[in-house]
Every structure is written in C-alpha cells, then in structure tokens.
C-alpha cells in the first residue's frame, strides 16, 4: 500500500513540477541561460578593454624581468596624447 500511495502522489505532483524555491523549470532555465549569456558578455567586454597579450615568448623571462602593461590602456593613452598635440598644432596655426 505504501508504495502505491507514493507512486500515486508522484504522478499527481508531476503535472506541476516546481523547484524547491517555487520557480518552474522553464523559468529556471531562462534565468540560467541569461546569467550564462551575461557572464560571457562581461568576459568579452573585459577582454576588449584590456586587450590581453596572448603572445608567449620562446625563452621565458628570468624572475624580475617580466614587465606587464595594459596594452589597451597604452593605445588609448597614446591616441589621447596625439589628439592633444594635433589640437595644439591647430591652435598655433
């Protein structure tokens, strides 16, 4: 009797399967896919901003010789400096 009651209750509850927090599976999957998409988009934005140096030297540098820089920041800084110089030249003329 107990086993049949268990199967009966499972078959009744199967029509409205809810997660423990009361969220349905389709809603859970939508939230999960949106969070994964946001994570990938955030990673892409970070990599576009910082422009990581993916080149690997044949001979690894000795300890203390490795110099890191933010290439994306350096490019923008050089562009801003060139723009300021161009503005200064136009004012002189």
Image: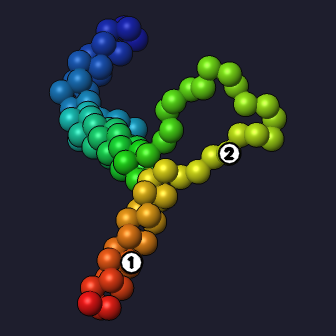
Q: Can residue 22 be spotted in the picture?
A: no
Identify the residue at image location x=21%, y=35%. Answer: 26
In the picture shown, does residue 16 fall above or below 21? above
User: Label 1 belongs to which residue?
Assistant: 85
Q: Residue furthest left?
A: 15
Please tell me whether mark 2 sits on a helix, a strand or a loop.
loop
The image shows residue 24 at horizontal and vertical percentages of 25, 38
Identify the residue at image location x=50%, y=38%. Answer: 53
Q: Residues within 10 Å of mark 1 (few under 14, many from 20)?
A: few
Q: Residue furthest right?
A: 63
Q: Can residue 40 be spotted in the picture?
A: yes
Choose top left, top right, bottom left or bottom right for residue 90.
bottom left
User: Label 2 belongs to which residue?
Assistant: 67
Q: Earlier in the sequence, mark 1 or mark 2?
A: 2
Q: Are marks 1 and 2 in contact (CB under 8 Å)?
A: no
Q: Residue furthest bottom?
A: 92
Q: Which mark is residue 26?
A: none
Quadrant showing the C terminus? bottom left
Between 63 and 23, the residue placed more toward the observer is 63
Q: Name the side, left or right, on which 55 lies relative to 39.
A: right
Q: Of discs 1 and 2, which sits in the foreground? A: 1
The image shows residue 10 at horizontal and vertical percentages of 29, 20
Between 84 and 42, the residue placed more toward the observer is 84
Q: How many numbered marks are there?
A: 2
The image shows residue 3 at horizontal and vertical percentages of 38, 8
Choose top left, top right, bottom left or bottom right for residue 9.
top left
In the picture shown, does residue 84 fall above or below 39? below
Quadrant showing the N terminus? top left
The image shows residue 60 at horizontal and vertical percentages of 70, 25
Q: Measure how far apart labels 1 and 2 are at the Cα level.
A: 28 Å
Q: Residues within 10 Å of mark 2 (few under 14, many from 20)?
A: few
């Amino acid at each position: 009797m107990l086993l049949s009651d268990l199967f009966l209750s499972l078959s009744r509850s199967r029509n409205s399967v809810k997660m423990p927090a009361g969220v349905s599976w389709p809603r859970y999957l939508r939230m999960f896919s949106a969070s994964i998409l946001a994570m990938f988009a955030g990673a892409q934005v970070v990599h576009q901003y910082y422009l990581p140096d993916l080149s690997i030297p044949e001979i690894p540098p000795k300890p203390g010789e490795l110099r890191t820089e933010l290439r994306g920041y350096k490019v923008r800084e050089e562009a801003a400096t060139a723009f300021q110089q161009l503005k200064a030249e136009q004012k002189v003329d």
